[in-house]
């Protein structure tokens, strides 16, 4: 049962942390809980579908289907997170002002909400399909049902709990700095996911590694340790990255940051605050 | 309700993206003959459990899962993880690698599914 719980926990953790970050980063947006829930539901449904067709997906594109699907999901999530960040850098300050003024969540258009839905669904479906396959394997090999269900519940609960802890932690950040901090977290998260996508594409033989191992810090902080794994999910820590992964990470980081700077300033200028104060907040 | 109207979009988008990436990268694949090695999974064990591959060369590992249940081929040292459905084959590209020993295992049956890649 414990073995099952550990694997389910590992798979759930990444999705749970991403959902927590998205929930935090979209603080103040009315109805976001509903959209995140819908995203989770869609993610689970698609995960079941992906698991059901795992064989066919794996065989597709000369045995590269799984990697291409994974990389595509990750890159789609990167685009959505980037878009979310650009949107928040343009509207975040206004959102915070309005939250303080009206004392409750602010209504926004459906576009930022659909980005939230997408990211959530993508995160859940990626980790979910692996969990489903693993559990299917266990069930098919005749593991006793009690242990299986117990392991799933335990692993799921632990993963969700960590997500809740992260979310609560995020909410403790003062509103004044809140969107600046979550903006950076989302940025690093997106860069890390892009580097993971590069990893899948090299696994499929579609991208060269450039340099097989840019550094090896496994002795200092092993990526498979608890802290290493957490940092891997949150900021894309990698103890043995290939050259192409470093390139993907840096390019994503710089590109999203540039877009945030490019589109972020405009709204701040129009919000009617003194320019000096606005530049401090930026 | 609105969230359910867009239910199809994630699937379609990712499939489109997959096709796009596939279309762009397929010409790249035609080049370079990569040496191929097959590892069979049977009764949740790797056969052979030790496999010798050349150093500084990109190699293709074909993993043939003859069990009815899925397995996840995983290696921390190679930074590889891939789910292989029951009764199917999958390919994993590794390298170019430095000489040494790289452990791999089946994440779904870690007790029995263990193997090593020996790079010479």
Image (cartoon, grey):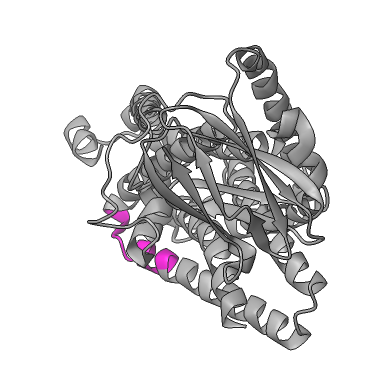
Is A237 drawn above or below residue A135 in the view shown?
A: above
**Is residue A218 in view?**
yes
Q: Residue at x 39, y 36 (%)?
A: A89
In front of the other: A126 or A160: A126
Tell me where the magenta segment starts and ends, as one range: A166-176
Q: Quadrant of the C terminus of chain B?
A: top left
Give me the residue at 70% from left, 17% from top: B23
Q: Is residue B25 left or right of residue A282?
A: right
Q: Position of residue A166 (x, y in %)?
A: 41, 65
A97, A149: nearer the viewer: A149
User: Would you say the magenta stretch is mainly helix, strand or loop?
Assistant: helix
In this image, A194 relative to A178: left or right?
right
Q: Is residue B23 above or below residue A84?
A: above
Residue B73 place in picture, x, y as percent: 60, 52
Pick the residue in front: A128 or B98: B98
Q: Can residue A30 be seen from the camera position used here? A: no
Give yes or no for residue B34 being in the magenta stretch: no
Left or right: A35 as drawn, with respect to A80: right
**Vertical side of A176 occupied by A68: above or below:** above
């Amino acid at each position: 049962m414990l073995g099952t719980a550990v694997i389910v926990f590992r798979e759930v953790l990444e999705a749970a942390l991403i959902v927590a970050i998205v929930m935090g980063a979209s603080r103040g947006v009315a109805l976001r809980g509903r959209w995140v829930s819908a995203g989770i539901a869609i993610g689970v449904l698609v995960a079941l579908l992906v698991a059901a067709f795992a064989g066919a997906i794996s065989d597709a594109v000369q045995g590269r289907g799984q990697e291409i699907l994974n990389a595509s999901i990750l890159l789609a999530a990167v685009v959505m997170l980037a878009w979310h960040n650009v949107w928040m850098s343009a509207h975040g300050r206004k959102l915070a002002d309005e939250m303080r003024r009206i004392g409750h969540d602010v209504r926004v258009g459906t576009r930022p909400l659909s980005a939230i839905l997408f990211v959530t669904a993508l995160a859940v479906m990626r980790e979910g399909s692996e969990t489903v396959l693993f559990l299917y394997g266990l069930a098919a090999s005749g593991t006793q049902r009690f242990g299986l269900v117990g392991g799933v519940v335990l692993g799921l609960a632990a993963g969700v709990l960590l997500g809740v802890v992260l979310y609560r932690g995020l909410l403790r950040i003062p509103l004044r700095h809140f969107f600046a901090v979550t903006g950076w977290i989302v940025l690093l998260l997106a860069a890390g996911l892009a580097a993971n996508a590069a990893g899948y594409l090299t696994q499929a033989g579609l991208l060269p590694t450039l340099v097989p191992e840019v550094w090896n810090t496994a002795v200092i902080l092993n990526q498979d340790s608890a802290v290493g794994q957490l940092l891997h999910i949150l900021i894309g820590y990698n103890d043995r990255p290939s050259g192409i992964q470093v390139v993907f990470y840096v390019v994503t980081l710089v590109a999203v940051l540039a877009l945030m700077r490019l589109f972020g300033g405009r709204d701040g200028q129009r919000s009617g605050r003194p320019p000096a104060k606005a530049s401090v907040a930026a | 309700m609105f969230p359910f109207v867009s239910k199809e979009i994630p699937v379609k988008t990712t499939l489109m993206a997959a096709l796009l990436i596939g279309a762009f990268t397929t010409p790249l694949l035609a080049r370079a003959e990569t040496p191929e090695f097959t590892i069979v999974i049977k009764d949740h064990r790797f056969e052979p459990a030790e496999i010798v591959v050349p150093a500084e060369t990109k190699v293709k590992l074909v993993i043939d899962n003859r069990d009815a249940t899925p397995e996840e081929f995983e290696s921390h040292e190679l930074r590889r993880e891939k789910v292989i459905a029951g009764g199917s084959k999958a390919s994993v590209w590794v390298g170019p690698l430095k000489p040494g020993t790289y452990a791999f295992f089946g994440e779904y049956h870690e007790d029995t599914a263990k193997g090593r890649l020996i790079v010479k």
